[in-house]
């Protein structure tokens, strides 16, 4: 597979076609080797318009969704980012290339270990990976400029938004399958947040994500 050609076609035919027009995001996705982060069994599909299966029932988001996430968050070089769900580490790498620093959390130790090796191989030094239940954030007292939640929440709540700095942005996908809503939450003051609906999609839920009471049996 000609990976450089595949990346370029992915950016032009999938990402840009889905209203991702931020040149920084497009240029990043055109050079970052996404195939390095894909499990060997799916490597030929690394640049296809689809979610890529990972271990533990998780997935890599489709490239166009990754592009929309990055465009919505608009990471800047002086900003801090929190990633909820390291997964393959690809989004960690994207955030690290655009933001100043990244803290990425995942409940699966094999994910954080493998992603850490890939980031090191790519020379990415501004991302810290921790193995922990990212739905709880026990002991995380600091705030962040950006928060990216890479698994879905059955029901949106303010848990992550409260960890934003004023002016900070949160990307999260909330709802029940088959249709969920991608949201951009912006903290506009200490006590107020703005909410923008971006698009519809579907994504596996975060492990241990709170389930709405109506869905308990």
Image (cartoon, rainbow, N blue to C red):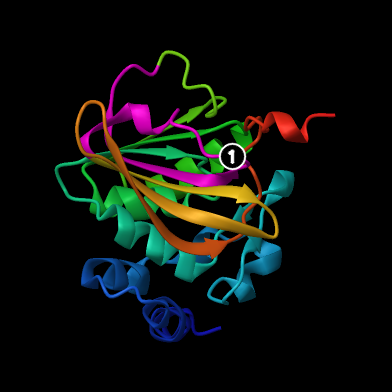
Task: Classify the position of the N terminus by image quarter.
Answer: bottom right
Residues in magenta, as a range: 140-167
**Residue 159 shown left or right of residue 135 in the figure:** left
Q: Name the residue that disc number 1 marks.
A: 155
| Relative to 68, 152 lies left or right | right
x then y, percent, for residue 134: 52, 29
Note whether 48 is above or below 158 in the view shown: below
Q: Is residue 186 above or below residue 166?
A: below
Question: Could you tell me which secondary element the residue under label 1 belongs to?
Answer: loop
Q: Residue at x 62, y 37 (%)?
A: 110
User: Along the line of sight, which residue is nearer the eye, 150 or 159?
Assistant: 159
| Residue 58, percent from left and from top | 66, 49
Give the quadrant of residue 11.
Answer: bottom left
Q: Is residue 154 magenta?
A: yes
Looking at this view, is 155 or 127 the one in front?
A: 155
Question: Farthest left residue?
Answer: 78
């Amino acid at each position: 597979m000609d990976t450089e050609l595949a990346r370029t076609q992915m950016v032009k035919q999938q990402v840009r076609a889905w209203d991702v027009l931020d040149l920084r995001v497009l240029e990043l996705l055109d050079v970052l080797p996404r195939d390095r982060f894909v499990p060997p069994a799916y490597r030929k599909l690394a640049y296809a318009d689809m979610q890529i299966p990972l271990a533990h029932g998780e997935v890599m988001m489709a490239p166009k969704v990754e592009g929309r996430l990055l465009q919505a968050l608009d990471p800047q070089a002086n900003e801090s980012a929190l990633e909820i769900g390291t997964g393959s580490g690809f989004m960690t790498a994207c955030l690290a290339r655009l933001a100043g620093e990244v803290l990425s959390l995942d409940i699966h130790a094999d994910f954080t270990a493998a992603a850490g090796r890939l980031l090191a191989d790519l020379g990415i030094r501004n991302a810290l990976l921790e193995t922990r239940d990212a739905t709880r954030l026990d002991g995380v007292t600091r705030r962040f400029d950006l928060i990216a939640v890479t698994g879905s929440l059955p029901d949106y709540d303010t848990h992550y938004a409260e960890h934003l700095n004023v002016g900070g942005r949160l990307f999260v996908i909330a709802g029940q399958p088959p249709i969920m809503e991608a949201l951009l939450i912006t903290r506009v003051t200490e006590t107020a947040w703005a909410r923008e609906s971006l698009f519809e999609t579907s994504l596996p839920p975060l492990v241990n994500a709170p389930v709405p009471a109506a869905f308990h049996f």
